[in-house]
Amino acid sequence: MASSANNKQDIVIIKYNAGNIQSVLYAFERIGVSAEVSDDHDRIRNAGKVVFPGVGEASSAMNYLRERGLDQLIKDLKQPVLGICLGMQLMCAHTEENDTTCLGIFGENVKLFKPGPNKEKVPQIGWNNIFHLKTDLFNGVPEQSYIYSVHSFYASEGSETIATADYIHPYSAALHKANFYGVQFHPEKSAAVGEQILKNFFAIDPEPLQRTASR
């Protein structure tokens, strides 16, 4: 595994009490990228890129992050950071899940899906389309590509939305601000489209993002 500090090709996956860390690690291995799972502050801070995954409940996850100082560490990161599913939600301002204040990296709020007139099931589980794709995270990904999602909560749309999906109503399938990216879906379970997105994240040049993050 890569372990040298300040290596642009070095990926660290943040270790915390969220369930899909190993599947994300294996997804990077499938595309030929070596990643490391760690909760060590120096290791995370010095990584070339950081992945913040997550499956689980928001308030307990935030409590875990705060108890270990990982909340402030994540907010202070200057390299490219990718939040996945709960990870993206925790990067938002607030979630309705147990009325939880989150990291506030993104300005959007996270809300509970409420079944519409067609009595859609909550959570959303399965394949859905993404569209209105923006930024280099989606290079080579066609509009209306299928991705795999499992979630009861969603981030509202806003100026930081870089991909949209529609379940009951439109919502943010992905967000971007400075060096921070987030996807609501699971790229590690989204077949070739998910692999392309992970390859795109790996290929992001951190230098322009670090200059933006420092402003």
Image (cartoon, helix red, strand yellow):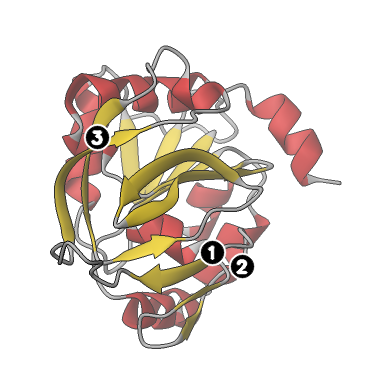
Going by the picture, which residue comes out furthest to the top?
140
User: Label 2 near label 1: C-beta < 8 Å?
Assistant: yes
Tally the numbered discs.
3
Q: Which residue is mark 2?
A: 104
Q: Which residue is mark 3?
A: 147
SS at badge 1: loop
Residue 184 visible in the picture: yes
Q: Residue at x 49, y 79 (%)?
A: 66
Q: Is residue 203 above or below residue 22?
A: above
As rendered, which of 113 and 83 lies closer to the eye? Answer: 113
Q: Residue at x 80, y 35 (%)?
A: 211
Q: Residue at x 66, y 48 (%)?
A: 159
SS at badge 3: strand
Mark 2 vs mark 3: give the one in front.
3
Going by the picture, which residue comes out furthest to the right?
215
Rate crowding at label 2 as few (under 14), some (14 to 19) or many (20 or more) other CA atoms within 10 Å.
Answer: some
Q: Residue at x 56, y 25 (%)?
A: 8
The image position of residue 27, as x and y in percent, is 21, 31
As rendered, which of 126 and 14 lies closer to the eye? Answer: 126
Mark 2 or mark 3: which comes first in sequence?
Answer: 2
Rate crowding at label 1 as few (under 14), some (14 to 19) or many (20 or more) other CA atoms within 10 Å.
Answer: many
